[in-house]
Image (cartoon, grey):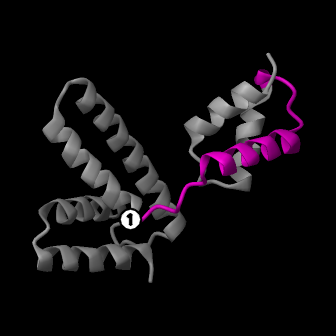
Amino acid sequence: MTMIEKINEGIKEAMRSRDQIRLATLRMLKSKILAVDARANLPDAEVIKLFKTYFGNLQEALDQAQSANRSDMAEQLKSELAIIQEFLPKTPSLEETKKLVIQAIADAGAKSKKELGLVMKALMKLNNTVDGKLAKEMASELLAD
């Protein structure tokens, strides 16, 4: 079953169970797909890329809502993030991420922070589900100035 089929099934289930937040979130995900390809013929890799971007935007909005003390909006954003996360591949744990960063540094042959871009490129080839922000921080700590 493709991602688009899963979303369509999820929409049907949300309509049956009258889960308004889930329904709205899944419809938003579907609209993101349709905005790129009107026939929804995108490969799953492209769909995941779209969802990751949207997930990042929602996380940013959540941070802003929390800093503005908007708990009602923050709760809704948290539930939307949880729904989207169901469709994203599982991200590696902290220890797994550190192992991948060390491997990427070795693969890139990086010696200083100036070569951080090479490390990140090698890391994404190893595993593109890694949290980029966390991996960049780890790589910066491991590389000398």
Classify residue 45 by image quadrant. bottom right
Q: Amino acid at mark 1?
A: Asp
Query: Which residue is pictured at 74% across the width and 48% down the height?
Result: 100
Query: Which residue is pictured at 17% across the width and 36% down the height?
Result: 71
Image quarter in which the N terminus is found:
bottom left
Q: Is residue 35 visible?
A: no
In the displayed structure, does residue 44 sit left or right of residue 82? right
Query: Which residue is pictured at 58% across the width and 41% down the height?
Result: 132
Using the image, determine if residue 117 lies above or below residue 102. above
Query: Which residue is pictured at 63% across the width and 30% down the height?
Result: 137
Say if the magenta span includes residue 126: no
Q: Which residue is mark 1?
A: 37
Extreme residue in the top direction: 145
- Dot 1: element: loop
Residue 54 point in image, percent of width and height:
37, 49
> In this figure, what is the number of numbered marks?
1
Residue 31 point in image, percent of width and height:
27, 61
Say if the magenta span includes residue 91: yes
